[in-house]
Image (cartoon, rainbow, N blue to C red):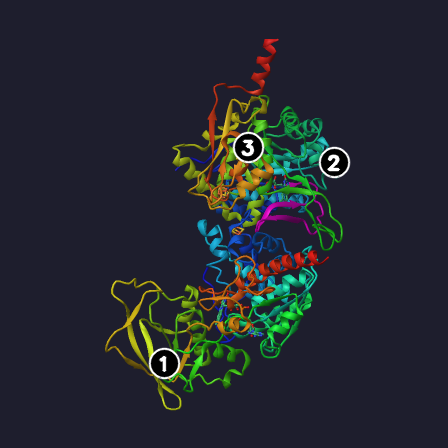
């Protein structure tokens, strides 16, 4: 279904909420499948047919409860989940019509919850005893904290930033998810009974060892780092941005104070690149070009992200790599070269080896360069705490997320699993690790009795 | 082009579609407009001693996002002066000599009043009379309407009052608020009815507002039982129609009413024995314009089958509806559900329906989208094919067994042995 985007205010949410009548029409399209494929396609297993039926039966509050019971970040997920690849991709109605708009219906329920009184969640019938520390208040940490708090554990979350929410708060552009949504969710977890320590970086303000000594279990949910350097000359010049810093600036600063320049190059073609590019456009840049060393078939951005960038007037330069940022004090241009896959390699593969085309260099006349080539992995952290790693990734048990250190677990983006990381997968990790921690602590408690 | 015209108990009409007596046929303005738009006939809003109505008068039950699956009303008969009604009837008839104008009547049980009123209706030039023995609210409490239709003796007597002095065909409109519609129907025929029409509305309480705890509709805090009609009542009407049509003692034409919204609904009524049909709720919902779908659809249907005249399909399916005891038993004739895996979208609705609501014979196969029917255990109830959202995805395949036997035949066979 083509959605008419709200483009009146450049940093306000572009996808409009369903009108009540649209919501009812859409809810009635759901077949209320049994053991529904959409549920299986949702990493947090939200009972989708049930919440949609609750909307259709005029009990939106119950719908919100159903969603939050499975996914405490239901309001964020309703907005930023790649639904085509998840729940809506599993919906049976894609075969006989078009999928039910599960994400937007979820938003109907969650918007209702956000404007209503605090809604208690159902008792999950588990009464755990113990103290658990969660490091990082991003989606993974919030997912774990919620589940453990509901199980009866004393949960304390340590977060370096002044607010919780992780990338939901600092990394998702506000025209896709308003800041207030993420902050409301953090508050919800707080109301459930979780304690938060903001502005507290573990490893700086509190030692990891100290934390392990104070708590029965420690869950590491620190996410990934900033965007790595490109390793080319001139990238420390003023006017070169880390894409995450740019997005964060649009959420924490006055927009007029951000100097975005007039011509912008964005390096990389994933979803972060799209976000940075559209941010730049919306901040007033005249020309924004995404520079990518492969082409459209290999880019990792979702189709709707790609469409969105094009709608915003972002242009693409395929088969191009930056080789040097030009300028004296500030960026004055970006020297680029053309690429091609080595002989015999598959052009469409993201893995194929590339080579530079000799003599193909040219200069893009830009005054801003934004790096959006992924995020650094926290490999130093694993070495610091002494957790076993493989290829710089921490080794965890597939089921329990336990690291090689006893009582220490790791979840979410910080695992560096590759592929497109999502908020919903991070929340699902949090739920799973909570059960693992519960099982571990129950066993320990039984032994000590 | 098929010939859609009918001659129903001597009443001629360019097509079999009449507006039923009700708010659509309250005035000359409306009936003229309806005829201009293509309706073949109209049964005038029941005339009688003018009544005083209440407000509100209607309530509806909605389903799955569609409005007015069922409609309920507590409106009484015409609240307009008799003279106005009769004058307008005469005017309409003068303007539309070839359309059918039938006057619905309801008066107290007094032969003189009936004789006089029938005479006055005749003088308008109307084509027929319909006796309203069906209104289930208000009038029934005053000794008229469904109270007459529910007691065969009364039905016979009042029909006699009207028929004796009438040169016009008399149609008796029956109430469905009876356990068996045949006795009042036959009584009306004995009283002199030239035709029967059915059904009038079904007694109902429409609902309760769960916030205010008020009945729906409410008239300053009180509600009442009222007449139910619209698409939801069609199966009830079809049953009553076919039971009369199949009764050998009923030899008069039948006019089908109740839940007709599309030409397809109308065809079903015709096939079960209706020589004409009447429509109320659907035209109240969408306006007179639905007549285009009705006439064109019926015409195309007949053309497609090479049927020249609409009366050729009347009753053609009726003889197939009858006593349960004449149905072949399941050891004799059986259906087995067959899921066409290539059409299945994987909703598992058939699975849960059969598991919880039928005979636990649909299996889910790990790794496979389409469930599978364990044929040996399937009783052929149809449930799965009804819940499946994909048309024709679940086919009910007949399995012939060597024996052919109904319950009645079985009983005969068993008794002949002893
Ligand atoms: C630009 C961008 C756009 C995205 N868009 C989408 C999208 O549209 N849909 C989607 O599903 N996903 C999207 N993602 C991915 C999604 O944001 C992540 O997968 C998700 O946030 C991972 O959650 P997390 O809790 O593991 O990590 P984070 O969200 O990174 O949270 C980690 C938290 O830990 C804190 N922390 C780190 N170290 C310490 C420490 N030592 N002590 C205390 N606190 C610490 C950090 O400050 C942070 O708050 C996007 C990501 C980016 C970068
Ligand atoms: C508001 C309303 C008023 C009605 N008034 C009369 C009436 O005065 N006389 C009558 O015989 N039937 C009356 N009926 C019943 C209809 O003529 C018809 O029998 C019934 O509605 C079933 O047909 P339907 O399902 O097409 O509506 C009325 C129905 C409605 C909805
Ligand atoms: S798969 Fe689609 S139709 Fe079925 S329950 Fe889920 S949303 Fe509804
Ligand atoms: S026809 Fe009835 S018994 Fe047979 S599979 Fe379908 S639901 Fe089950
Ligand atoms: S109800 Fe129909 S579509 Fe659904 S699983 Fe059964 S056969 Fe498939």
Question: Does residue B154 sit above or below A411 in this rendering?
Answer: above
Q: Which chain carries label 2?
A: B
Q: Mark 3 points at which residue?
A: B381
Find the distance from the CA under tag 2 to the CA under tag 3: 45 Å
Q: Give how far across and how far down residue A82 sits, in percent.
A: 48, 62
Find the distance from the CA under tag 1 to the CA under tag 3: 73 Å
Q: Which chain carries label 1?
A: A
Mark sitting on residue A107: none
Q: Can residue B29 be seen by looking at this rendering?
A: no
Q: Can residue A75 be seen by looking at this rendering?
A: yes
Question: Does residue A315 sit above or below A50 in this rendering?
Answer: below
Where does the C terminus of chain B fall, quadrant-wise? top right
Where does the N terminus of chain B fall, quadrant-wise? top left
Question: Which residue is found at the position 50% from the left and 64% from the top?
Answer: A395
Pointer 1: residues within 10 angstroms few (<14), some, or many (20+)?
Answer: few
Marks 1 & 2 on one chain: no
Pointer 3: residues within 10 angstroms few (<14), some, or many (20+)?
Answer: some
Question: Does residue B318 sit above or below A130 in this rendering?
Answer: above
Mark sitting on residue B143: 2
Pointers 1 and 3 in contact (CB under 8 A)?
Answer: no
Q: Give how far across and how far down residue A285 sits, in percent.
A: 42, 81
Extent of the magenta region: B46-74
Q: Could you say which is closer to the camera, residue A399 or residue A232?
A: A399
Marks 1 & 3 on one chain: no
- Judge depth for marks 1 and 2 and give the one in front: 1
Q: Give how far across and how far down residue A253 sits, in percent.
A: 54, 82
Tell me if B43 is positioned left or right of A377 in this view.
right
How many marks are shown on the rendered structure? 3
């Amino acid at each position: 279904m083509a959605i008419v985007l709200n483009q009146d205010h450049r940093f306000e949410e572009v996808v409009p909420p369903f009108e009540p009548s649209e919501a009812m029409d859409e809810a009635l399209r759901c077949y209320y499948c049994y053991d529904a494929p959409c549920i299986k396609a949702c990493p947090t297993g939200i009972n989708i047919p049930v919440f949609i039926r609750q909307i259709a039966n005029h009990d939106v509050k119950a719908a919100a409860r159903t969603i939050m019971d499975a996914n405490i970040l239901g309001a964020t997920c309703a907005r930023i989940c790649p639904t085509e690849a998840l729940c809506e991709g599993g919906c049976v109605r894609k075969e006989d019509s078009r999928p039910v708009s599960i994400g937007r219906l979820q938003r109907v329920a969650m918007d209702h919850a956000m404007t209503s009184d605090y809604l208690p969640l159902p008792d999950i019938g588990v009464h755990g005893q113990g103290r658990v520390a969660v490091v990082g208040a991003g989606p993974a940490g919030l997912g774990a904290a919620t589940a453990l708090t509901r199980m009866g554990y004393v949960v304390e979350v340590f977060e370096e930033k002044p607010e919780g929410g992780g990338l939901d708060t600092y990394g998702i552009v506000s025209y896709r998810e308003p800041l207030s949504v993420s902050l409301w969710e953090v508050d919800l977890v707080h109301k459930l009974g979780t304690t938060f320590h903001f502005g507290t970086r573990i490893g700086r303000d509190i030692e990891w060892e100290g934390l392990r000594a104070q708590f029965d279990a420690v869950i590491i949910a620190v996410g990934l780092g900033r965007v790595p350097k490109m390793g080319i000359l001139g990238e420390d010049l003023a006017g070169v941005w880390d894409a995450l810093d740019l997005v964060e600036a649009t959420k924490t600063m006055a927009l007029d104070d951000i100097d975005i320049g007039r011509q912008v190059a964005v390096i990389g073609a994933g979803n972060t690149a799209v976000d940075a590019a559209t941010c730049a456009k919306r901040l007033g840049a005249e020309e924004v070009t995404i520079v990518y060393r492969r082409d459209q078939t290999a880019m990792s951005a979702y189709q709707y992200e790609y469409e969105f960038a094009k709608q915003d007037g972002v242009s693409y330069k395929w088969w191009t790599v930056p080789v040097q940022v030009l300028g004296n004090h500030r960026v004055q241009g970006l020297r680029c070269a053309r690429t091609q896959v080595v002989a015999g390699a598959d052009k469409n593969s993201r893995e194929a080896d590339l080579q530079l085309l000799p003599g193909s260099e040219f200069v893009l006349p830009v005054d801003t360069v934004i790096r959006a080539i992924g995020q650094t992995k926290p490999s130093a952290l694993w070495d610091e705490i002494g957790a076993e790693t493989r290829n710089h990734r921490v080794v965890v048990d597939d089921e329990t997320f336990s690291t090689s250190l006893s009582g220490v677990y790791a979840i979410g983006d910080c695992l560096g699993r590759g592929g497109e990381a999502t908020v919903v997968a991070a929340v699902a990790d949090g739920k799973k690790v909570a059960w693992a921690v519960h099982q571990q602590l129950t066993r320990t408690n039984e032994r000590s009795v | 082009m098929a010939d859609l015209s009918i001659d129903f108990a001597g009443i001629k009409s360019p097509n079999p579609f009449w507006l039923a007596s009700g708010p659509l046929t309250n005035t000359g303005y409306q009936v003229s407009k309806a005829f201009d738009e293509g309706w073949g006939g109209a049964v005038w809003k029941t005339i009688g001693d003018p009544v005083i109505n209440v407000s509100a008068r209607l309530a509806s039950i909605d389903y799955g996002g569609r409005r007015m699956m069922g409609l309920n009303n507590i409106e009484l008969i015409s609240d307009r002066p008799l003279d106005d009604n009769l004058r307008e009837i005469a005017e309409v008839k003068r303007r539309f000599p070839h359309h059918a104008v039938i006057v619905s009547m309801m008066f107290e049980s007094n032969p003189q009043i009936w004789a006089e009123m029938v005479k006055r209706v005749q003088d308008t030039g109307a084509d027929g009379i319909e006796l309203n023995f069906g209104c289930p609210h208000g009038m029934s409490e005053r000794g008229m309407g469904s109270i007459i239709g529910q007691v065969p003796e009364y039905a016979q007597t009042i029909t006699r009052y009207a028929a004796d002095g009438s040169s016009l065909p008399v149609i008796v409109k029956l109430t469905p608020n009876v356990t068996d519609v045949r006795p009042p129907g036959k009584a009306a025929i004995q009283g002199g009815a030239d035709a029967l029409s059915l059904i009038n509305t079904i007694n109902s309480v429409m609902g309760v507002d769960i916030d205010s705890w008020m009945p729906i509709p409410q008239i300053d805090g009180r509600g009442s039982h009222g007449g139910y009609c619209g698409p939801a009542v069609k199966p009830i009407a079809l049953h009553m129609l076919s039971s009369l049509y199949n009764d050998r003692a009923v030899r008069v034409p039948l006019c089908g009413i109740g839940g007709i919204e599309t030409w397809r609904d109308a065809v079903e009524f015709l096939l079960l024995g209706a020589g004409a049909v009447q429509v109320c709720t659907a035209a109240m919902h969408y306006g007179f314009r639905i007549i285009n779908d009705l006439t064109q659809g019926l015409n195309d249907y007949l053309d497609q089958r090479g049927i020249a005249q609409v009366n050729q399909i009347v009753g053609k399916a009726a003889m197939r509806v009858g006593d349960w005891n004449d149905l072949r038993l399941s050891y004799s004739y059986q259906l087995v559900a067959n899921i066409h895996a290539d059409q299945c979208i994987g909703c598992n609705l058939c699975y849960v329906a059969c598991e919880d609501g039928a005979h636990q014979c649909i299996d889910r196969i790990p790794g496979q989208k389409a469930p599978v029917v364990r044929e040996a255990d399937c009783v052929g109830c149809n449930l799965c094919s009804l819940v499946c959202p994909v048309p024709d995805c679940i086919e009910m395949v007949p399995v012939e067994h060597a024996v052919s036997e109904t319950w009645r035949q079985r009983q005969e066979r068993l008794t002949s042995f002893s």
